[in-house]
Every structure is written in structure tokens, then in C-alpha cells.
Amino acid sequence: MAAPLAEPGQRLLARVVDTLVVGVPVVLVVRELVSGHAADVIAPTAVAGCMLLYEAVQLALWGRTLGKRVAGIEVVVAAPQEAPGAAAQGAAEAAGGAGPGAASALPVSVPGFVPVAAPEPAESAAPGEAEGTGAGARPDVLRCVLRAAVYSVPIGLRPIPVLGVLASVFWVANAGVLFEGTRRQAVHDRLAGTLVVKRPRPESSAF
């Protein structure tokens, strides 16, 4: 059964928790070691590097970060999407390529053929459900590093005047893309080929 996709609120909660867990300690340490304008330049870069390692390592090992554990969600590999009409075309080709004696899905008006019911289309995931993914489909290391880097690298660009503005625009676009389509994939999900789904709750044993 397809795993239900994570709600936007769950993803936001996970990001807030992860940002606090990583960002606050790193900024405090940097400001203890460096003062003045240098701290404003070093802190974002340090946060970006620590966030990249923090997220990539945890996703590769467990498929979820501390924030995602709190929110009850995890990252899985996304199944490839079929082009519109591919299922119908495949069904038509299957019917046309049937061997001698096989039943053909032709209308009653065609003489010499026995009408049969047309093959039913493959069941597709309902909106809000992951297509063909399971809780155990954990992404590999390269996917995890790519996904973490796409989100974390813009943090380190904030001190650079022009790139800092572009990074802010990217974060807004990244959040907006989440609502485009039925798979709720942000930019880093689309590039890494991942989905964020709700983690199944363990079944309680009956006594």
C-alpha cells in the first residue's frame, strides 16, 4: 500500500526543529570564538556545513533526522512517474499483441469477435499518497548528500550580497514548489528523486 505523503505542516515542524538543533549551538560557538563582522560572515557558512553533515548522515543511516522523528515523517526514494496516457497505451499494445486465440477487447459491432471487458487501468495512488514507495525504501548516500546540499548550501551564501538575495529567493521558490503537483516535492526532493512520507506507526499488540 502506498505510504501517505507528509503534510506541509509536518515538514515545517521538522525543519524548525532541525534548524534549532543545528543552528543555535553553532552560532553560539562561533560568536564565542569570533566577534564583530567576522562572526556574521563565518556563522552562516558554519551552519551550512554542519546542517549538510547533520542531514546527510542521518538520512543515509535512518531515512530521517531528529526533526523528522519529532514530526513522524521520513524520506524515501520516489518511484518514477509514468507519462500521461502511458498506461492506456500499454494496455492497447498488450491487447493488440495477443497471440492467436486470445480474446480481443473490441466492441460488439465488429463481426467475428467475442467482446470482452477492456483491461482495467492500473490503480494509481490517490492525491496525498506516495506512488509505489514503501517505508523501507531508504535513499542511498548520494541522494542524501545531494538533497542535503541543495537545501544547506544557500545558507552559506547569505553573507555574499547578490548570492544572499538569490538564496532567499530560492528558499521561497523551494517552499512554493512543494504545492505544485500531487507528490509534494520541494526542489531538493525533485533533484534527489525523493519523497517525504508519514512514517507508519507500529501496531500495538493486543492483550
Image (spheres, rainbow, N blue to C red):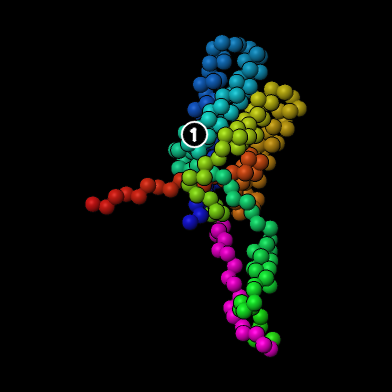
Q: Quadrant of residue 142?
A: top right
Q: Nearer the viewer, residue 2 or 41?
A: 2
Q: Nearer the viewer, residue 63 or 153?
A: 63
Q: In which quarter of the image is residue 93?
A: bottom right
Taking the spot 71% from the left edge, 28% from the top edge, the residue there is 164
Q: In which quarter of the image is residue 187?
A: top right
- The residue beneath circle 1 is 61
Residue placed furthest toward the left = 207
Taking the spot 68% from the left edge, 33% from the top edge, the residue there is 168
Element under disc 1: helix
| Rendered location of residue 40, percent (x, y) | 64, 18
What amino acid type is highlighted by mark number 1?
A: Leu
Q: Which of 138 and 191 is in front in this view?
A: 138
Taking the spot 55% from the left edge, 59% from the top edge, the residue there is 126
**Residue 150 highlighted magenta (yes or no):** no
Note whether residue 16 is visible: no
The range drawn in magenta is 111-127
Note whether residue 38 is visible: yes
Q: Which of 171 and 133 is in front in this view?
A: 133
| Rendered location of residue 23, percent (x, y) | 54, 25
Taking the spot 63% from the left edge, 51% from the top edge, the residue there is 80
Tell me: residue 22, above or below residue 76.
above
Predominant SS of the magenta segment: loop
